Image: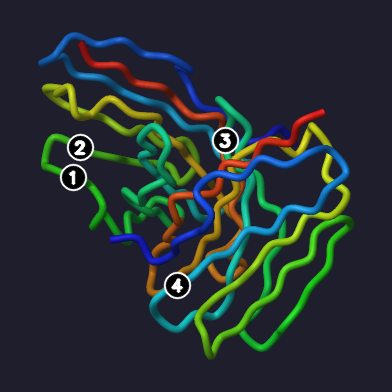
């Protein structure tokens, strides 16, 4: 079973709108990471948030972490067509990395 | 240097054939991971190396799957007697050191078993 679960599974928005994706996980973590995957490509690391952090920013990305609810959110502001991709959260509850099923984001021009 | 390189990018195999998938990690990266990704799903962990030592192979789905990294750099994932359910994208990732945890992924090998 997967540690992380993203929702929604799919999201379509217009260019310029904000996109919010959520991730829930099951066990305690040291950090949580978000990755992006364009169609036919490997995953690209976006941002890492540690368990003692509540919020982190990187450019147009904002990540929050609520360890009491075992959840995280990824906000992409002022979305662009190039943001169209699948987004995954990943945790390392033990020795391994566990990825959720992902949110497929479509940004329409 | 260059990123993680995987070859071949695409592989078509007849059921029962053996296949070998190659991963060239980023130079100097200690840790190397293999994942299997089904269509529309997230990557599923297969195995992990630290240098040449295979520290975790708990994700390998059967004894038909075998991975090695004999000199602590290039790794090969071998699948024997391929089955249709082995069709997936196989991703390789490397990281500088285990505790840093940020992984750099290759583009993957798409395996289709007919």
Kindly check if marks 4 and 2 are in contact, taking CB atoms under 8 A apart as contact: no
For mark 3, name the chain. A
Q: Dot 3 lies on which element?
A: loop
Kindly check if marks 1 and 2 are in contact, taking CB atoms under 8 A apart as contact: yes
Q: Which mark is residue B65?
A: 2
| Distance in Å between CA atoms under marks 1 and 3 | 21 Å
Kindly check if marks 4 and 3 are in contact, taking CB atoms under 8 A apart as contact: no
Closer mark to the observer between disc 4 and disc 3 = 4
| Distance in Å between CA atoms under marks 4 and 2 | 28 Å
Q: Dot 1 lies on which element?
A: loop
1 and 3 marks on the same chain? no
Residue A33 higher or lower than A72, as above or below:
above
Residue B74 higher or lower than A91, as above or below:
above
For mark 2, name the chain. B
Crowd rating for badge 3 (residues with CA inside 10 Å; few <14, some 14–19, many 20+): many
4 and 2 marks on the same chain? no
Residue A11 higher or lower than B14, as above or below:
below
Q: Quadrant of residue B91?
A: top left
Closer mark to the observer between disc 4 and disc 1 = 4
Q: Give residue A27's position: percent from left, percent from top.
A: 39, 80
The one nearer the camera, A46 or A100, is: A100
Q: Which residue is mark 3?
A: A42
Q: Which residue is mark 1?
A: B61
Crowd rating for badge 1 (residues with CA inside 10 Å; few <14, some 14–19, many 20+): few
Q: Dot 2 lies on which element?
A: strand
Q: Which residue is mark 4?
A: A25
Kindly check if marks 4 and 1 are in contact, taking CB atoms under 8 A apart as contact: no
Q: Dot 4 lies on which element?
A: loop
| Distance in Å between CA atoms under marks 2 and 3 | 21 Å
Looking at the rendered image, the quarter that the C terminus of chain A falls into is: top right
């Amino acid at each position: 079973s997967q540690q992380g679960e993203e929702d929604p599974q799919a999201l379509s928005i217009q260019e310029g709108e904000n996109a919010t994706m959520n991730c829930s996980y099951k066990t305690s973590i040291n950090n949580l990471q978000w990755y992006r995957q364009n169609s036919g490509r490997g995953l690209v690391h976006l941002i890492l948030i540690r368990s003692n952090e509540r919020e982190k920013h990187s450019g147009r990305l904002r990540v929050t972490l609520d360890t009491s609810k075992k959840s995280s959110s990824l906000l992409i502001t002022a979305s662009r067509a190039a943001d169209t991709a699948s987004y995954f959260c990943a945790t390392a509850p033990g020795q391994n990395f566990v990825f959720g099923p992902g949110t497929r984001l479509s940004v329409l021009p | 240097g260059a990123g993680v390189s995987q070859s071949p990018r695409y592989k078509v195999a007849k059921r029962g054939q053996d296949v070998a998938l190659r991963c060239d990690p980023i130079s100097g990266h200690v840790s190397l991971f293999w994942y299997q990704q089904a269509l529309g799903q997230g990557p599923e962990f297969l195995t992990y190396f630290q240098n040449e030592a295979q520290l975790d192979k708990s994700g390998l789905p059967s004894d038909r799957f075998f991975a090695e990294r004999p000199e602590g750099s290039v790794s090969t994932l071998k699948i024997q007697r391929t089955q249709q359910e082995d069709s997936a994208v196989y991703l390789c990732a490397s990281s500088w050191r285990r505790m840093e945890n940020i992984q750099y992924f290759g583009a993957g090998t798409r395996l289709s078993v007919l």
